[in-house]
Amino acid sequence: MTNTSTATVCESESTVKGDAAIVVGVIIGAQGVLGAVKLKSYCEPPEQIFRYKPWTLVRDADVRSVVPIKLRGAGGQLVARLPDMETREQAEAMKGFEVRVLRSQLPKPAAGEYYWHDLIGLRVVGVCGFEFGRIEAMLETGSNDVMRVKGERERLLPFTPGVHVIEVDLNARTVKIDWDPEF
């Protein structure tokens, strides 16, 4: 994966004392019969999700704070045990809960690396001054990350620092790119 940070995350609207809650994964189902849950991690590497505690689990208006008590990988899957979960049915009922952690728990990205949620909403401007629009989402394609930019039309533009991405200015909330607006 060529993502731009140690954790591929999306910013949520939740905050705790000004510290943004960041989505780092989602519960995708039950594992076994003893109440373990399977996870899809948005972190890079995926096991990084286990370094963050506590987790805030959110699905619609249901919000729960938990500290996972047993964590492991199982056959390529990520599995967690949560407090007071003892049956498969309890674990199945957790399907769809987002796993969120506080932004302050995440490591500071290295120079030239960015968390995806920091890029969402930035204006994308061409070196010629053309306004492409704002980054709506970041996508992983395998070869490089892609910005989904919405302006007068939607575009998928490669996020390739040093190639097409000339500058990322988080303070000015802009990404300068070298890309043909007609393409």
Image (spheres, rainbow, N blue to C red):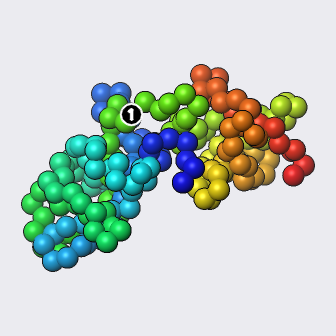
Query: Which amino acid type is marked by label 1?
Result: Pro
Q: Is residue 18 left or right of residue 109?
A: left
Above or below 59: residue 33:
below
Residue 75 position within the rendered picture, expressed as x and y whole percent measured from the top left: 31, 72
Above or below 163: residue 42:
below
Q: Is residue 80 left or right of residue 107?
A: left
Residue 131 position within the rendered picture, expressed as x and y whole percent measured from the top left: 80, 36
Residue drawn where x is 50% and y is 41% of the image: 5
Quadrant housing the N terminus: bottom right
Residue drawn where x is 18% and y is 52% of the image: 68
Residue 140 position within the rendered picture, expressed as x and y whole percent measured from the top left: 58, 55
Above or below 154: residue 15:
above
**Viewer can see residue 53:** yes
Q: Give the SS element for disc 1.
A: loop
Residue drawn where x is 34% and y is 31% of the image: 104
User: On the image, which quarter does residue 89 sit in?
Assistant: bottom left
Mark 1, residue position: 107
Above or below 45: residue 127:
above
Please name whichever residue, 102 or 43, is drawn nearer the observer in this view of the structure: 43
Residue 37 position within the rendered picture, expressed as x and y whole percent measured from the top left: 24, 66
**Viewer can see residue 95:** no
